[in-house]
Image (cartoon, helix red, strand yellow):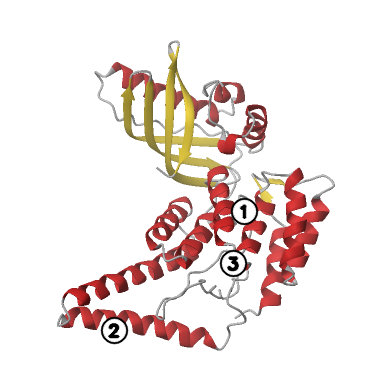
Amino acid sequence: MLQRNSMRKALAKALAGVFFCGAAVAYAAPADDLKDAQKLYTQGRLAPSLEKVDGYLKAQPRDPQGRFLKGLILTEQKKTSEAIQVFTGLTEDYPELPEPYNNLAVLYASQGNYDKAKSALELAIHTHPSYATAHENLGDIYAQLASRAYDRALALDKNNAAAQVKLSMVKDLFSSQKVATAATKPAPTKTAEPKAAEPVKPAPSEPSKQEPPPKVATTTPKTEPTKAEKPKAEPAKAAPTKPAPSAGDETNAQVAAAVTAWAKAWSSKDVAGYLAAYAPDFETPNGEARAAWEKTRTERIEAPKSIEVGVTMKSIKVSGNEATAVFRQAYRSDAMKSNNTKTLKLVKVGDKWLIKQERTGG
């Protein structure tokens, strides 16, 4: 188990070597602010660390490294609402990263909101099925939900022997976990050393007597390929779209065709065609300026050597000149891969269906 200082040093080392979209992250003058913020965080000096990272984010507001570090600082400062806002923003701008979803789940669990915690962990696992921390945390959430259900059952029927036995088993499980970690608890908030070390669990702000706190992800989200995934040099082709509408429904077929063309332009790295799929009044994330959003999307499309975007349509609903398409999106490039549910709201402009709103996660 790691002590607080060693945990923070491991985190700083991990933060310093992160790459995004297969290319090294390179910043201008404020890069020193991020390094200073990381160093202060490892020393436990949270207030000056937050001040430094805020200065960095004024110049690089979309940078995932700085935003993730800010979320960790706010979490340790028990500023739960602000930390939730930071990690939620990361899931919206970088839906392919599992760590922000996991940390959202930890924060929701600390508030006793286990349904939201469960949903966040399920999204983390959909994004990265081999993310062991999210699987373990999800098991803890299910156990806590089971404990509550058994409590309710006993409140309704005190003589329910089966419920009493099951509740006792759940409580024994939680107690054994606490015994195993009690001797190594350095502070209320615990983190896991990146990659190799045995994780230590952070305690929620209002834990129940039997509740095991889920694990916070402290390693900055990475989108570079793992050793098991060899980058593909050859250009990839878009996987075929599976439209939900019937063959006779011409309008639904047009919407499905628009989504297919959008995915094909993305797969072909056709930036102009990709951006042309969005309506003039497209609702950019967090109200960002359209020009800034287009610049960011262009950089993220041009960075990988190859891209493949597969679409499996789940449903299409049309109402007048508006439509909603829900589908599973399988993204793969030489730098990363993800698989999640996406919802596009489209509007008919002339004879074309264009994207007005884009949302990941259903």
Earlier-in-chain disc, 1 versus 2: 2
Residue tagged 2? 168
Is residue 38 in sight in this rendering?
A: no
Give the secondary structure at mark 1: loop
Report whether 287 appears left or right of 14.
left
Query: How dense is the environment of label 1, judged by Cα within 10 Å: few (below 14), some, or many (20 and up)?
Result: many
Q: Are marks 3 and 2 in contact (CB under 8 Å)?
A: no
Q: Quadrant of the C terminus?
A: top left
Q: Identify residue type, mark 1.
A: Lys
Q: Residue at x 79, y 45 (%)?
A: 27
Query: Which mark is drawn over residue 158?
Result: none
Earlier-in-chain disc, 3 versus 2: 3
Q: Residue at x 57, y 64 (%)?
A: 217
Percent of width and height locating residue 159: 14, 83
Q: Identify residue type, mark 3.
A: Lys
| Front residue of this view, candidates 74 and 17 | 74
Q: Is residue 212 above or below residue 66?
A: below
Residue tagged 3? 78
Q: Identify residue type, mark 2.
A: Ser
Residue tagged 1? 222
Q: Is residue 247 above or below residue 288?
A: above
- Residue 294: image quadrant is top right
Disc 1 from disc 3: Cα separation: 25 Å
Q: In the current view of this chain or complex, which residue is farthest to the right?
A: 29
- Residue 250: image quadrant is top left
Disc 3 from disc 2: Cα separation: 31 Å
- Residue 116: image quadrant is bottom left
Q: Are marks 1 and 2 in contact (CB under 8 Å)?
A: no
Q: Residue at x 32, y 23 (%)?
A: 319
Name the mark nearer the viewer: 3 or 2.
3
Report whether 340 appears left or right of 143.
right
Query: How dense is the environment of label 3, judged by Cα within 10 Å: few (below 14), some, or many (20 and up)?
Result: some
